[in-house]
């Protein structure tokens, strides 16, 4: 389940060209491979960039491409591109889901100079109230 905390509908798939080598090295195991294969087959420049910017993932990229569907329509290609970008967008989905399952709420906020971030909080119910002026029983 994608969180979609960054809307990728208007984001071009060429945005992947902005990723650094370290970020590219994190992709195997995190991205939906059938969708990635469709997107890379339709965007060979991106496949070339992944393989050359981060040679250690070349075999993985080539394997994903070899297993991909060559007959995808333009609509399927765009959906695959958005699925891949959402998977990158939500790379920390495991931590997010863990916190949500623990009862934490979350929201997006804009960090000046850093962009969109998430913050988490948990409201703890008060079980007993007392006045600061009262002295607790010992």
Image (cartoon, rainbow, N blue to C red):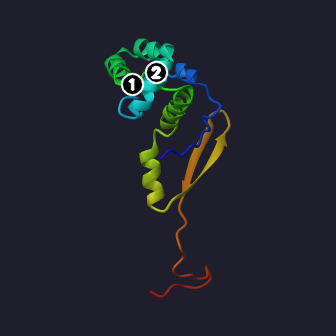
Q: CA distance from mark 1 to mark 2?
A: 9 Å
Q: Is residue 52 left or right of residue 131?
A: left
Residue at 57%, 81% in the rendered image? 129
Quadrant, the C terminus: bottom left
Q: Quadrant of residue 68?
A: top left
Expressed as whole percent of the image width and height from the top left, the position of residue 42 reads 50, 19
Tag 1–tag 2 contact (CB < 8 Å): yes
Which is more toward the observer, 38 or 120? 38
Q: Would you call the spot at circle 1 few (<14 residues within 10 Å), some (14-19), or many (20 or more)?
A: some
Kind of element beneath mark 1: loop
Q: Is residue 105 left or right of residue 22?
A: right
Point out the frontmost of discs 1 and 2.
Answer: 1
Which is more toward the observer, 12 or 113? 12
- Residue under label 1, please give it: 68
Kind of element beneath mark 2: helix
Q: How many numbered markers are drawn?
A: 2
**Which disc, if any, is residue 58?**
none
Q: Is residue 40 visible?
A: yes
Which is more toward the observer, 36 or 90? 36
Q: Is residue 13 above or below residue 98?
A: above
**Which disc, if any, is residue 40?**
2
Expressed as whole percent of the image width and height from the top left, the position of residue 66 reads 34, 20
Q: Upstream in the sequence, badge 1 or badge 2?
A: 2
Residue at 53%, 62% in the rendered image? 122
């Amino acid at each position: 389940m994608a969180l979609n905390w960054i809307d990728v509908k208007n984001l071009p798939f060429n945005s992947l060209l902005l990723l650094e080598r370290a970020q590219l090295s994190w992709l195997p195991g995190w991205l939906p491979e059938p969708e990635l294969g469709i997107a890379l087959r339709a965007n060979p420049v991106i496949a070339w960039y992944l393989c050359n910017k981060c040679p250690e993932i070349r075999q993985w990229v080539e394997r994903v491409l070899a297993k991909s569907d060559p007959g995808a329509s333009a609509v399927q290609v765009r959906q695959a591109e958005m699925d891949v970008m959402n998977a990158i967008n939500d790379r920390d989905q495991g931590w997010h889901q863990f916190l949500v399952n623990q009862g934490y709420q979350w929201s997006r906020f804009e960090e000046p100079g850093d962009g969109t971030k998430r913050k988490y909080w948990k409201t703890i119910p008060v079980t007993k109230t007392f006045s600061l002026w009262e002295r607790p029983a010992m």
